[in-house]
Amino acid sequence: MDDGEFDYNVDEDEFNLDDNDDTDLNDVIAGSGDLGLNYLVGLYGRATVPLTERLDISARAGYAFIDVDAMVVTPGGTTLGVIEDSADGPAIGAGLSYDLSDKWDLRGDYSYYNFEDTDTGAASIAVGYKS
């Protein structure tokens, strides 16, 4: 009789976690996966201070929203799960900007995101054109 409760007294064959039939469940823990960033948007305030005539330092603070998809696949090719999630939280960052010429600059930034269940960071390098 199925009462709808999870049955903890089953073996791995009933779950088919060992779908490559090597009798080793350690490879399931090390299964491959895919993490996809659908989008990350934020609203920030930014302050910039010149260090030299060509070099500026900046700091920013704001709020960001992220949407991701994740999938885990066993070595035998069975998809264990697909997770779609989104989160929001405060974000802070800092960066340097160097004027290569009157029209072009090179910028490096680091941002730290404090989302609901996880913290993450991102670094970027950009070349910009000033009109």
Image (tube, rainbow, N blue to C red):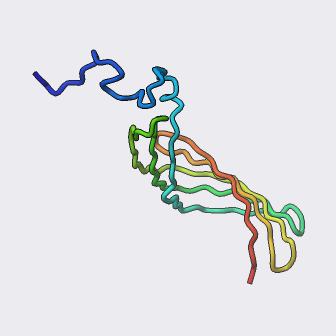
Q: In the image, what residue occupies the spot 19% across and 24% down? A: 5
Residue 82: x %, y % from top left: 39, 45
Residue farthest to the right, as pictured:
53
Q: Looking at this view, is 22 or 30 the one in front? A: 22
- Image: 84 above or below 125: above
Residue, far left: 1
Q: Which residue lies at the image location 48% right of the left edge and 55% below the top edge?
A: 65
Q: Nearer the viewer, residue 93 or 39?
A: 39
Image quadrant where residue 9 sits: top left
Q: Is residue 14 above or below residue 43?
A: above
Q: Residue furthest top?
A: 9
Q: Describe residue 130's horizontal placement relative to residue 23 as left or right.
A: right
Give x and y (percent) for residue 14: 30, 25
Image quarter in which the C terminus is found? bottom right
Residue at position x 53%, y 60% in the image: 42
Q: Residue furthest front?
A: 21
Q: Position of residue 88 (x, y in %)?
A: 46, 51
The image shows residue 126, relative to residue 69, as above or below, that is: below
Task: Please provide percent x and percent y for residue 79.
Answer: 40, 41
Q: Quadrant of the N terminus?
A: top left
58 and 80: which is toward the camera = 80
Q: Is residue 31 above or below residue 68?
A: above
Q: Is residue 2 left or right of residue 73?
A: left
